[in-house]
Amino acid sequence: MDLRNRDRVLSGSFSCLATIIFLLGSVLALVEAGGDKTDRLALLEFKAQIADPGGVLSSWNDTSHICNWFGITCGRRHRRVTILDLASNNLFGIVPPHIGNLSFLRGMLLLNNNSFSGQIPSNLSHCSNLLNLDLSFNMLEGNLHAELSCLSKLHSLILQHNKLTGNMPPSFGNLSSLHVFTTSSNNLDGTIPETLGWLRNLKVLVLNMNKFVGMIPISIFNISTLTNLSAGENQLEGGLPIELGFTLPNLQRIGLFDNHLTGPIPESISNISNLGQIQLKSNNFIGKVPSFSKMRGLYWFSISSNNFGSGQYANLDFLCSLTNSTNLKYFNVESNAFRGPIPGCIGNLSISLSRFGLGNNISGKIPPEIGNLIKLKYLDLGSNNFSGKIPESIGNLRMLTKLYLDSNNFQGSIPSSLGNCQNLLLLDLSTNDLNGNIPPKIVGLSSLSIYLNLSQNSLTGSLPGEVGNLQNLNELSLNGNKLSQQIPSSIGSCTSMERLYVQDNFFEGPLPSTMSSMRGLQVLNVSKNRLSGQIQEYLASLNLMNLSLSYNDFEGALPTGGIFRSAISTSVVGNKKLCGGLLDFQLPKCDYEESKQRKISRTAKVSISVVSALVGVACILSLLYFFWFRHNKKASTSSSSEDGFLHVSYNSLLKATRGFSSTNLLGVGNFGSVYRGLLDQTQLIVAVKILDLTCHGASNSFVAECEVLRRIRHRNLVKVLTVCSGFDFKGNDFKALVYEFMPNGSLDEWLHPIASQYIERSKLSLLERVNISIDVACALDYLHHHYEMPIVHCDLKPSNILLDDEKTGHLGDFGLARFLPEAMHKLLANQSSSIKVKGSFGYIAPEYGMGSVVSTQGDVYSFGVLILEMFTGKRPTDDMFENGLDLHHFAKATLTDRVEKAIDPVLLQEIEELN
């Protein structure tokens, strides 16, 4: 071929090649244009099916290219969506399946920290190039789809804090590229798949707070790349493999707390030199604790509530091996079987240590070297067998906020050096054998705000006047000592104090009048002292819920207002010079000299005699009629007492509830449990509320509820039949309230039924919800406006609204209720109060959190939240309400054009069926 022909051929070839390239380019352009359209449609459909209160997706419209939309990142070449990042934008709704059409997603799909609900779309598996998928902190539910295991390139799969259920698919073992896998805070159950051990690149495995059972697969302990292994708060069993320290050499955190694991900690764990966190608390581990001398980076060590130690001497030698862990901040080995003394090497532990807990059967003295741990904020050595003196060196721990040395055998005086700990919020030295005076520097610690407990010791002398510095203190317990002289008037400066216990001492003289300033005081116990004088009227003006003045030398007339209206809440026995008061106190009448002595004339005497005779005859006739009438009518009950209340005892309630059987359990509240019972004497079905008196505030709740329920009567209030206050068979205090049984349970059970209740019950209709709302409104109206003084319920929520057989609403649980004197009621807007209202989170009025006075308006706010919950089906505490979004704003945001998003789906279904 000559050059001319060759050039012609080459020229033609280049022309053909150029044509082919042009055609390919055109085809690719068409493909890209079509792909762009696919992504656009998928994203617009996604936007259409979710709610966006903040308007963050406003840029998702036809005026701009998708690559310029909020949260979108596109590839440079094809201009297709490769990253979708919508994290933390207050979005809610069901994740639409169209998201699976974003087939070019290869970087990240981040929908975390929103309020998405419904199931995870199974067609996410179409995004086969996806590297990172984060759906955490939403409300997603349903099972994990096996199709997700097709995402073989995934590096991270983060599903924590949702409502996922069911078993974990074994096919997840095919996610061979996975580095991070977290499913904590869900409701996954069944066993952990053995196939997870196939994930040879896995570094982080977090399965906390689910319902997994069985043993941890041995294959997981063979993933040598693991740095974090966490499966706490499940129901796992079995032990840790002996070779743990060799098969997991890179482990930095092991968190298997709150399970049922057994056996010892393997000695080989000491080889994991990079281990920073050991969290094994609340299991059934046993045996000797190994050495940790190689773990220089260890900063968190928690093995409390196990069975470590042999119960023999010198079980705490492992403490010395932790002196090499120079970053140690948290140490807790409480509730084990350790015994013996604390080794002196405790003073060589990390200077960074901020929390130290050692509550076992430790004996001996506290080493003075403990004063070297100058960054300690929390020190708990309570419930041991320590003896000797409390070392002065504890005063060096000036950053302490909580110090527990209670329930030991400490002797000697309280070291005044504790006054140097000026950040203390709580100090508990109770139940020891301490003696001497109370150091003024201790009661002068103005930082104390939670409680100061010096009870059950042998302290003597007076209560220092510096007690007035405790202006922020909530509770002061000095009972069971030998304190004497007068209670100082400076105590009136403790305006935040709610509970004051000074019983079982030798205090004398009158109660200081300055105590009238303690407006927040709820419980005052000064019994078994030598106090004298008249009981001052100011006590009636305080908001006391429990008052004990018994076994003193008080005299004069007992006040009749405030707390003195209740013989249940007030005890004055053992004061022989008291008189007057309400009849319930059974005190003698007060004798007053009449200013003018008048002689009764003979005529008056005759008149009185005649009238008395007539009255006597009338009484006899009335009694005869009464007995005749009673004999001839059917008795409604054979066990009614003279005051109309049933007589019940601990024994009768024990029988009625079948030994407080779990099968009779109706529910558990803040201060106790409610059981279904059948009273033998009447064959009446009742609800029995047993107070858990170990709970702080339970006794006060009992007193408050008795005080309220004995006074009020209304068709929409739960009726109390009787109360029981006595002792169980072991001599422990026992308190219970017996209510009319409500066969339809609580409103909460109807609004948020568990799975078994879906089958047992129909759903609340719209009309039924409206009627229940009216019932609750009527109850509140009675409490607020139709009793002699306003009553504030303080804890209005669905679980406190009970439904009878006709689904009529009855308001119950008055354990936090408060009476408002009329004068206080009129001045609510201008007053403040130090009372801390303990309502339920989500329902309590926001102003209470800022120190506002208890008011009926607080109940009205709670009623508004209740109405929203009844018609949206959403709790105010649901996970979706965070970052500024609450039930109120959620409902308000949907009123404009998406009201159907707010309505309870049950009601929507009812409306559709009617149409």
Image (tube, helix red, strand yellow):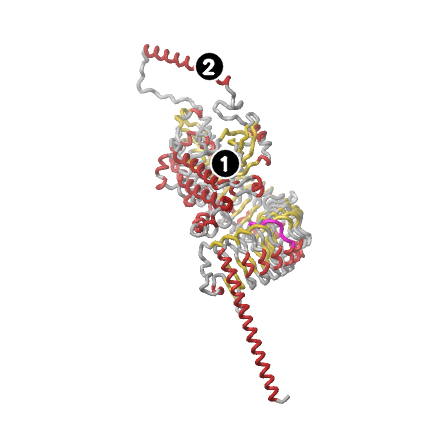
Q: Position of residue 284 (x, y in %)?
A: 64, 45
- In the rendered structure, does residue 672 fall within the stretch colored magenta? no
Residue 650 placement, left or right of 867: right
Name the quadrant of the N terminus. bottom right
Q: Is residue 166 magenta?
A: yes
Residue 439 against residue 174 in the figure, above or below: above
Which SS class for mark 2? helix
**Residue 779 placement (x, y as % from top left):** 43, 35
Depth order, front residue of 130/849: 130
| Observer-nearest of 381 and 459 | 381
- Mark 1 residue element: loop
Q: Is residue 285 above or below residue 607?
A: below
Amino acid type of the residue that numbered disc 2 sits on in the rendered structure: Leu
Residue 807: mark in rendering: 1
Residue carrying label 2: 624
User: Which region of the structure is painted magenta?
Assistant: 163-170
From mark 2 to mark 1, how far is it between C-alphas? 43 Å
Q: Please rate how many residues cluster around mark 1, counting C-alpha atoms within 10 Å: few if below 14, some from 14 to 19, many from 20.
A: some
